Image: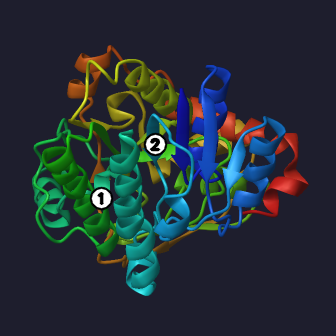
Amino acid sequence: MNILITGGCGFVGANLSLYLKKKKFNISSLDNLSRKGSSFNYKLLKKNKIRNYKIDISDYNKIKKLKKFQIIIDCCAEAAVEVSRKNIDKVFNTNLIGTFNILKKAKKDKSKIIFLSSSRVNSIANINKIIKKNYNLKKNLITNQLIDEKFEVSKPKSIYGFTKYASEMLIEEFNYAFGLKYIINRCGVISGPLQFGKQDQGFVSLWVSHHLRKKKLRYIGYGGHGNQVRDVLHINDLCDLIYKQIKNINKISNKLFVVGGSKKSFTSLKNLTKICQKITGNKILISKKKDTSIYDIPYFISNNQKVSKAYGWKPKKKISDIVTDITNWIKKDEKLIYKYF
């Protein structure tokens, strides 16, 4: 089976490419190599004989000339919400026009689509309503509220979130109009090796790398207490799920799934700091900034019930496992890897 992975030299795409190659699929990558860490991951793909097409996903004239693929996994995105305010054109061209181009290619070749969407399609206002009932900014969050496929997706959601939600709807329209088969995975935070973390994307790998290098960090927003909570999915758990989805694509299709670390793997920033201190053996200075972005949310934990029932899948890795795996990855070649953070 020929599979194309868009964003194949990014964090998720590179891990997926390497994982599925080991499962004996014929994997190709599409990535314009514009991100700082993409050249590092590109070399890994090349070493494993995975071809990368250096094409911008907004360029349909080049995409349509590629060979036929049975499945296209679309995980190419400008994934940082703050970038979507500062560089709107780039976010739209990559996230929405890019998906449109992949759908046209899939329609032409009768390919199936697995699309990686985002938890950021959910309403910021409605998440904040949950928090007002359950959340004490000066204490750790204690709540059983999980967010599933039926959660409100009305505005506001961020411009980034809009492009991902619009892509979801576009995929559904292609299914209705042309019979295109799809799976949409609405993912929360994903982390693990090959992720070069930044403040607004990949915060776990950012936290680990700063502890290893003894560089200072900040708790930003919500009083600066570090009590924001996210669930975090290990990249290997995501790869395992997508492998199951590929194997069952003829039986299970045209479905939307919420996918995340859920109750198996979630953390506050304060708790993440403690885990990083324990695993790296280093303590660092962490300052406070009370204010935060209009796009920030204090809480998100996914409800995996639907996807677990469909595939018999559950996350295996805890947050401490994720921190350990990132730490070990960085330590293998610290000088080289730090160049890309």
Sequence-wise first label, 1 or 2: 2
Q: Amino acid at mark 2?
A: Ile
Observer-nearest of 21 and 208? 21
Res 48 visible: yes
Res 281 visible: no
Colour scheme of the rendered structure = rainbow
- Count of residue discs: 2
Observer-nearest of 124 and 255? 255
Image location of residue 103, percent across then percent down: 35, 54
56 vs 304, left or right, is right
Q: Residue at x 39, y 34 (%)?
A: 261
335 vs 69, left or right, is right
- Secondary structure under tag 2 reads strand
Q: Residues within 10 Å of mark 1 (few under 14, many from 20)?
A: many
81 vs 22, left or right, is left
Give the number of the mark in front: 1 or 2.
Answer: 2
Reading the image, the residue beneath label 1 is: 120
Observer-nearest of 323 and 222? 323
Q: Which residue in the rendered view is the most extreme toward the top?
A: 312
Q: Residue at x 36, y 79 (%)?
A: 291
Image location of residue 108, percent across then percent down: 37, 49
Label 1 and label 2: CA atoms lie apart by: 19 Å
92 vs 150, left or right, is right
Q: Measured along the vertical axis of the image, is residue 221 above or below residue 332?
A: below
Q: Measured along the vertical axis of the image, is residue 273 above or below residue 146?
A: below
Image location of residue 80, percent across then percent down: 46, 67
Q: Amino acid at mark 1?
A: Arg
**Quarter of the image containing the C terminus?**
bottom right
Reading the image, the residue beneath label 2 is: 73
Observer-nearest of 197 and 242? 242
Asked where in the image residue 314 lies, by quadrant, the reply is: top left
Q: Residues within 10 Å of mark 2 (few under 14, many from 20)?
A: many
